[in-house]
Amino acid sequence: MTIVDLHPLDPATAEEIQAATDTIKKLFAPVQLHFKAAGLDEPPKKELVAYLEAEHKGFPRPKLPRRVFLIWYIKKAPRLFEAVVDVTNGKIDKHEELPRDFHGPVDRTELNEAAEVVMANPDVENEFKRLGLEKSSVVLDPWDYGVDGIDTQARMTQVFLYMKNPKNNDKDSSHYSFPLDFMVLVDLCTMKVTKIVRLPLGPDESTTEGKAVSLQDTDPAEPEYAHHLQKNPPRTTMKPYNVVQPEGASFTVKGHLIEWEKWRFRVGFNWREGITLHDLHFMDRSTFYRLSLSEMFVPYGDPRGPIYRKGAFDLGNVGAGVTANNLQLGCDCLGTIKYISGHVVAADGTPAPRPNAICIHEIDSGIQWKHTNHRTGKAVVVRKRQLVLQQIITVANYEYIFAWIFDQSGEISFETRATGILSTQPIDKDSKVPWGTRVADGVMAPYHQHLFNVRIDPAIDGHKNSFVYSDSVQMPWDEKLNPLGTGYVTKESTVNRAGPVEDSLYDGRVFKIVNPSVENPVSQTPTGYKLVPIRSQLLLAQPGSWHWRRSEFAESPMWVTKYKDRQLFPAGDYTNQSLGGHGIKSWVKDRDYVVDDDIVIWHTFGFTHNPRVEDFPIMPAEIAQFHLKPYNFCQYNPTNDVPPSSQAFNKSTLYEDTKTNGANGKSETENKPNGENGENGTSCCSKD
Amino acid sequence: MTIVDLHPLDPATAEEIQAATDTIKKLFAPVQLHFKAAGLDEPPKKELVAYLEAEHKGFPRPKLPRRVFLIWYIKKAPRLFEAVVDVTNGKIDKHEELPRDFHGPVDRTELNEAAEVVMANPDVENEFKRLGLEKSSVVLDPWDYGVDGIDTQARMTQVFLYMKNPKNNDKDSSHYSFPLDFMVLVDLCTMKVTKIVRLPLGPDESTTEGKAVSLQDTDPAEPEYAHHLQKNPPRTTMKPYNVVQPEGASFTVKGHLIEWEKWRFRVGFNWREGITLHDLHFMDRSTFYRLSLSEMFVPYGDPRGPIYRKGAFDLGNVGAGVTANNLQLGCDCLGTIKYISGHVVAADGTPAPRPNAICIHEIDSGIQWKHTNHRTGKAVVVRKRQLVLQQIITVANYEYIFAWIFDQSGEISFETRATGILSTQPIDKDSKVPWGTRVADGVMAPYHQHLFNVRIDPAIDGHKNSFVYSDSVQMPWDEKLNPLGTGYVTKESTVNRAGPVEDSLYDGRVFKIVNPSVENPVSQTPTGYKLVPIRSQLLLAQPGSWHWRRSEFAESPMWVTKYKDRQLFPAGDYTNQSLGGHGIKSWVKDRDYVVDDDIVIWHTFGFTHNPRVEDFPIMPAEIAQFHLKPYNFCQYNPTNDVPPSSQAFNKSTLYEDTKTNGANGKSETENKPNGENGENGTSCCSKD
């Protein structure tokens, strides 16, 4: 496919990435470069809006150049650059070197190299000797470094060490079950070990220097998650559950354009955000311009060094596109699946494929609506069909599953699931800590938080919207107006100025994005969408701490800003070893006026994760969902015309008719599948 | 099945209900009785615990008599009685007449009779004439009366009136789209109309007496939900989605005993609570003794008479068993379905069947856990299979779907979905109100709240538990202990005394039910379950209002009580036209000590429902779920041994392979279903 056939929102192709890195390499030759990131540089909103309007109206579309954004280092030097390359016209639109306090994302290439350096280091070898370990049993987890305020210009990695299960020494052993009591700091420029740090093993701030955790004492009840390594075989009680779509899926995918059940939108993909959603229309009306997970932060609560540096920005530090899993048919999703692949960049500038990074499929989510008229017994049921776009990222020990879920009701939900493996530390067998959980003898999982921010660029019936919140408040007693004290009303406030917006559970606060210029003729109120937030505990780290300074978005559940091109990442464009000050808090300093304007909403949510034993050796997913729901947007229920649920369509089966259930004995229940007209409803299937 | 074969927790059978009412009828003969309720009277906990212990240990079981609880009136008299009849031994264990301020539940028989009385009343006929209506187009919705403090001893119904869609006059027309401007009060003892009340039609407390809403002005964009009556035909874009379980279900049902994926429990059913769950064991260990939805309250926010009386206790006033839908194969649930039926009582004392009141089936809820070892590319995925027990109730205009959801992870969730039809009132075409939404010309849907309470009787590893809450709190800055200000710890508090328990979102409060005498050997903390609440706005009605006095439980998100037999319903045993004072607030007056004891937890949650246009003419379900999750109960992840997810088991299909997708054009994506080992994972299916 030639570049001229691409939509301005299509992800950067392999060819474009190659062309862009070639352009930069040519510029720097013969100096060797280490590429960190490459992806579509989306057109300025003004240009893109004009393009999209033409597209929707069927007019000739403006020709927009395709651009690729790049980040690179001069190899083995602390010199970081970014550029925007116009690959349509073969020119460089933007090119700058970043100040020395800015650090690029980490990447697997350099972290692997750092791991090798660690393994070859003689002081590290001595530590292995101390612990009585063979090198071949050791596994390394190099991490982004975090910040402690000491020498913020060195680009570092902090390498945590583990060993394979001594009982099997298997390459897929869950090494997190066997943490070692020291870690290693490596300078990523010089590729040299700078320090070896013993981890604290006791109940408080004292390390127990010289006192190794006896590795024989580390004996988890079940240290493995890979089934062939577990002590017990898998259970055999679970019977297959297949989703069959005999007429195929209800969605269509043409390139990156998706249409499903009155929804029409484009899906993008880039190295940092993974999935991005664009130009979302419902029932041929504009709802949202752009939706994405914009950042996440996972700060740890063990106050002791070196753990006090553990706080990962998994999007900015490494990238949700870079770490996207290759989703496999039948493993990660059920039913009729469409995969979309993408590309990121390898260290040498060649495009690195991310096959099957996004999966698309439908799910049935139970009943959408039902009513039975008790007078006639007629029941009408309609089911809740949804469309899921999902990606899974692996960031060292953890996995995150991010899903955008569309509903026939005009609702969009964003779901995050945290799974994978807890980050573990060694601990004396006899100690406990108030900031972590014993998950096995000798193994402690420290408390931490998962804080996410989703960027919502609305376009409810147009690009000029307002952000409003509506509280439900008691009416005062009043002999005439509120004689029995039962009344309550809604009080609406429009957010005037950019900044954080407070929540209020007590007032049942509902957040709404409205178009003040478009009135719903039925409710006679502005058309809009409501945002049902995930009410979460916010950042626990002290104001003034590096965690606090660097995360910015984690201080408030909601923010509003006036739209500006390139304001995408609320903890700043460069989060790795960042010092803060370049994120959303600086954007709102001028308190821009945000009424009836092009605004952006930022929702922060998450969970405080104080691990439990059930999270070990691998964690059943912790799930959180927030919703965007039409609120006086439509003129009536948009799912009214979803066909009625019926047996002919759904083909369910009676338990009694399935072969395994013959031996279960007589049931005393009456089972009349095509039941008589009871008082409460005749067959809803009868006429349909 | 003879009575001697029943388990003490099996629901009252048809024969038992008949036997019980016959016993009472014999006692009162020849006085005619009007039965209101009949159901299993569960054995006293002391006896039942002894029985269950014997059952679990395989010892001979004590013989417990079967008892039926009854409520009845002397027909057409304000004399209300309750009794407990021992149907095993044919004797009456308890028999009392209730004071005159207590009123029994309403029932369809008497409400239908009241409706007929209304239709035959000459003053009502005059109102129809005033509105230019034929009687045959009118539909009545008799409601429980509520309380206004005036004559609390008369047993009343308040009847709201609507008409069928004038364009079709169909028996299944959604009459709620066409509310009439008056309502009628009927005395249920004398069966006489006592008053006709004109509804307020304007923007405030003034009624507009004599000014009828012009029924020609009432013209909703789409007033109907029944598909054959809608203006537009159903969409044809939605393709079938079948759940096929080729080897049957993973659950077994023997009578009312259910076993599934390490869960074992009994399901009960009664006229009031609908589904009840008993004796829940996970991995052969006791978790909960009894779980049920204990009450719900739906107060309205329009402060004006007569709406100020609208506040329905749908369980106590009418009953979730009484109103249970007859669930139909293929309509309400998907997959392999087991139905359980039950019985309530008819007014004449005969058993009234509730066929297919409960459906049981599995669902797939996405990924339970996953990890990819980036070094080897090996991905291990396990799916989240759940078991759902569901019932649907229809209470006049509204439907509620209640589901108990079991998870292989040991988690239990309770989900409520509100759907059905908004309660509507007429409104002047030109008016708006601050306590309601215009959902169509001439139709207003008043604000209201849905408040639920779930009763949780825990038995975590035994009957003596404590209720604890755990807050995550910042550590103060400290040069030695918290040098970078990143630390946080958990602070646990045990609830000492019965009463309401506050929530704290700010502190990320987690509620836990623990057994202080049983220590988890891994975490070295008491075994327990955590309750993840639904954080909700609580009752908005003023303290001192009838809504407030009657609901009691709606004041606090959480309550603890010391277990006492028969303390089941937190707004009192008799909620219809109740005056309050007999619910949970009186139970906690003595502030019983609740540490390491037989305790009960009560969780109040809900949503403030300020209708939107999309909720009309029928409402897409509003969903809320809370969770009970093992918290340091197990020794490691209880889903470790769930078999790995694989294509052989799941049988998903590629979008490109389905016949409808041939015409969609070439996709630029790379689709490699058995992908190469990318950096991020090889096929998780390969070995399994």
Image (cartoon, coloured by chain):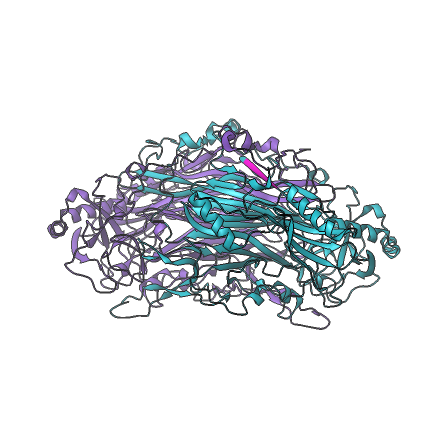
Chain colours: A cyan, B purple
Q: Nearer the viewer, residue A392 or B421?
A: A392
Q: Residue A559: tell me if it is visible.
A: yes
Q: Which quarter shows the C terminus of chain B?
A: top right
Res B51 seen here: no
Tell me: B121 left or right of A208: left
Q: Nearer the viewer, residue A217 or A264?
A: A264
Instruction: Locate residue A610 relative to residue A304 in the image: left or right.
Output: left
The x and y percentages for residue A307 are 72, 61
Identified at 66% across, 55% down, the residue is A83
Q: Is residue B533 above or below residue A258?
A: below
Overall secondary structure of the magenta section: strand
Q: Where A151 sits versus B687, above or below?
A: below
Give the residues in magenta. Answer: A337-341
Q: Quadrant of the N terminus of chain B?
A: top left
Give the camera-side residue of B272 and B88. Answer: B272
Q: Is residue A654 above or below residue A440?
A: above
| Residue A97 highlighted magenta (yes or no) | no
Q: Position of residue B107 (x, y in %)?
A: 28, 47
Q: Quadrant of residue A677?
A: top left
Asked if B422 appears above or below A338 in the picture, the reply is: below
